[in-house]
Image (cartoon, rainbow, N blue to C red):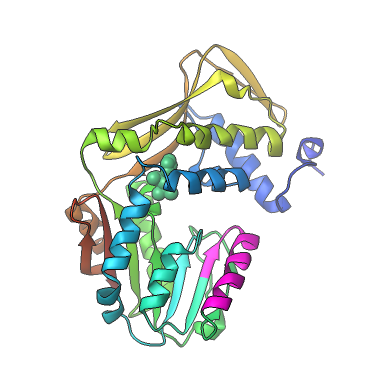
Amino acid sequence: MSMHAPALADAHLPDEQTSAFARDAVGDLSQHPKRLSPKYFYDATGSELFEAITRLPEYYPTRTELGILRDRGGEIASLISDNAALVEFGAGATTKVRLLLENCAFAAYVPVDISGDFIKAQAEALRRDFPRLAIYPLTADFTAPFALPSAVRSRPKVGFFPGSTIGNFEPHEASRFLRSARDILGERAQLIIGADLEKDEGVLYDAYNDAAGVTARFNLNVLVRINRELGGNFDISAFTHRAIYNRERHRIEMHLISKKPQTVRMLGTSFSFRPGESIHTENSYKYSMERFAALARGSGWKVRESWTDAAKMFSVHALKAE
Ligand code: AVJ
């Protein structure tokens, strides 16, 4: 039993997930500059706040990608062999995958996500609407290698990684992820992947600084989560949301800024903050069509087809394993 057991007693996660969160949070807040991984945004509240973000007038990515998948559904379907298995990396709401399932003749669907309960509930709803589709939910961290269910091994595989989640990865991590996806999906695999595009900086800024303050609550919620799951004592009102566009590095950066000098305790460790000091909580990389194609080519894939909306806000790519 660890010395931190009392602090962890209220956790609602399986032990190994809570201890990964604890290990990462303590390690990352001990860095200079301090940071936290965006993968910890998505507790129940964080997932609800993210769903609310996708409906904000300023947050164009979700509705733009849905529009592309809807308009290009027929073209996407024509690239995909019948009776393939669709493997979704990090399955959240089913709105996007439904568009693929409606357009393409998939025999099987494998949603892969760290949150097993959530994908099992989603699978139930999909089974009602697609009764002939075999669904094999897989609880796994999709950023690490995992094995596909044996029932789909003989089928052609099509990966699905929408939402520009790839934008959360550093460029070298994005490349490693694409190589790993290629290994998991096997030879002749395909990958349908969404990537947000570089654009007017004001549009980017507003998408992460919405007038209603939902993105600020989403960002601050990771501190609420640390308080609840890791016994932290963050004063949420003593931190403020900041999102800026870093032009040199082609990325939106989200930070939580300490409003004053303060010391916060968590799991027996103290973390001191200077006024104005940042916790860097997220990078959201924006690609050009050329830089995305170069990333894919350098990571074991070739681009078969790419689509954007008329205003070139967002891109969807069909990749083929090399
Ligand atoms: C889920 C990583 C694609 O980067 O736009 C939204 C997360 N962060 N608003 C993004 C997010 C703040 C989102 N991704």
Q: Quadrant of the N terminus?
A: top right
| Magenta stretch holds residue 30 | no
Q: Is residue 159 visible?
A: yes
Horizontal relation, residue 217 to residue 97: left or right: right
Q: Measured from the top left, where is residue 163 in percent x and y?
A: 39, 55
From the image, give the main secondary structure of the stretch colored magenta: helix
Q: Assign ligand 1 to one image quadrant.
A: top left
Along the viewing direction, whichever of 258 and 51 lies nearer the viewer: 51
How many discs mark residues in the rendered view?
0
What segment is highlighted magenta in the picture? 111-129
| Magenta stretch holds residue 115 | yes
Quick check: 240 above or below 210?
Answer: above
The quadrant holding residue 150 is bottom right
Q: Measured from the top left, where is residue 308 in percent x and y?
A: 22, 58
Horizontal relation, residue 248 to residue 5: left or right: left
Q: Measured from the top left, where is residue 280 in percent x and y?
A: 45, 31
